[in-house]
Structures are given as C-alpha cells and as structure tokens.
Image: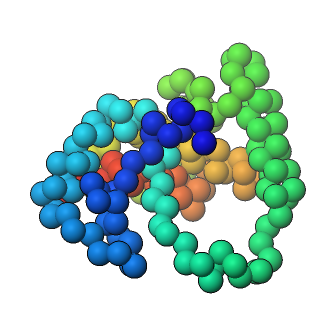
Amino acid sequence: MNWKTCKRCSNPCPCGFLGDPQHPCNCTPLVVQRYRRRLSGPLLDRIDLHVEVPRVPHKDLADPVDSESSCAIRARIEAARSIQRQRLAPFGLHANAGMAARHIRRFCLLDDAGRKLLELVTERMGLSARSYTRILKVARTIADLAGSDTIQQPHLAEAIQYRGLDRKVG
C-alpha cells in the first residue's frame, strides 16, 4: 500500500470494531462521533470514494467461486480510460477526476430522475458543493466503466453510496 493511500485510511471507531459481526465495539456513540470529527469536512470533500470494507470470513476467502477475471476487469478499465481521454483531450485533461465545473456541466448531464435523486441526497446528507461535484465525476466514471454514454440513475446511486462519510453523524 502506498503512503498516500494509507494516510487516507481510517478505522470506523477508535477500537476499530464498529460494525464487525465477530468483535463487539466497545466505543460509545459519543466517542465514535468525536473520533469521526477528526476527519474534517474539507478533508473528506477531497477524497472521491469513501468505502467501508467489512471483514471477510475465511470461508468466503477460500471459496473457489468463479468471478470476473482480472483480465476482463483490466479490459473494462482500459476501455473506460480510453473513453475519458478521447472525451477530455480537447481540454488538456485525461481523466474525469480532472474535470472542472464547465466540463461537469457538459459531460455529467442527468435525466429528471437523476436530478431529483441528487437533489434529495444533497439536502438529506447536507453535501458541500465539492462533494456534489465529486459524486458527478464518480458517476461519470461508473457510466464509462459500464460503457454508457449517459449517466443513468444506477450509476448515480452507486456514486452516492461511495460518499458514506458525508452522511451527517447523530
């Protein structure tokens, strides 16, 4: 793991067991709230994906179930990156993460259902403008990975799920 990635990792609480089905968390809600406040809003706004990674039971790790191969995943990623480079090359950009507001307005168009969903989520979660734009950029990337020219509601919903730490605490 590189150092930049490591600096952005965080346990869900001081003991590290909040939400773990095998180990009970001994932190009070107030302790958890104080711990999470250490990650300030402006810092969280600059992180595109907030992903909770639960403990994986051994039986699931050892299960030889077939899943999508690394080669297939790599091909999808390379295709999405190619789409982004082609779309953004005229602006001197190479990835959705580099889009400015004018690019977002042009390339992250939502249908009525998507606009309503994002409006509702913005109000309920109290999202900052930066979080709002991060969601749109991630949704555009998810749509690119799916091979879709437009951002559809499932792409937007998935992107919203990656902003879990933006949710108001308490």
Residue found 82% across the figure and 43% down from its top: 78
Number of callouts = 0
Image coordinates for residue 131, horizontal then vertical, percent:
40, 39
Front in this rendered view, residue 46 or 14: 14
Q: Which quarter of the image is occupied by the C terminus?
A: bottom left
Q: Which quarter of the image is occupied by the N terminus?
A: top right
In screen coordinates, is 123 left or right of 33?
right
Image coordinates for residue 120, horizontal then vertical, percent:
33, 55
Identify the image quadrant of residue 108.
top right
Residue found 39% across the figure and 78% down from its top: 21
Residue found 45% across the figure and 49% down from its top: 50
| Residue 47 in view in this figure | no
In screen coordinates, is 22 left or right of 138?
left
Front in this rendered view, residue 153 or 54: 54
Residue 61 sits above or below residue 134 on the image: below
Residue 138 sits above or below residue 104 on the image: below
Identify the image quadrant of residue 137.
top right
Front in this rendered view, residue 11 or 168: 11
Image coordinates for residue 46, horizontal then vertical, percent:
43, 33
Residue found 31% across the figure and 66% down from its top: 18
In screen coordinates, is 68 left or right of 131?
right
Image coordinates for residue 150, horizontal then vertical, percent:
66, 49
| Residue 65 in view in this figure | yes
Colour convention: rainbow
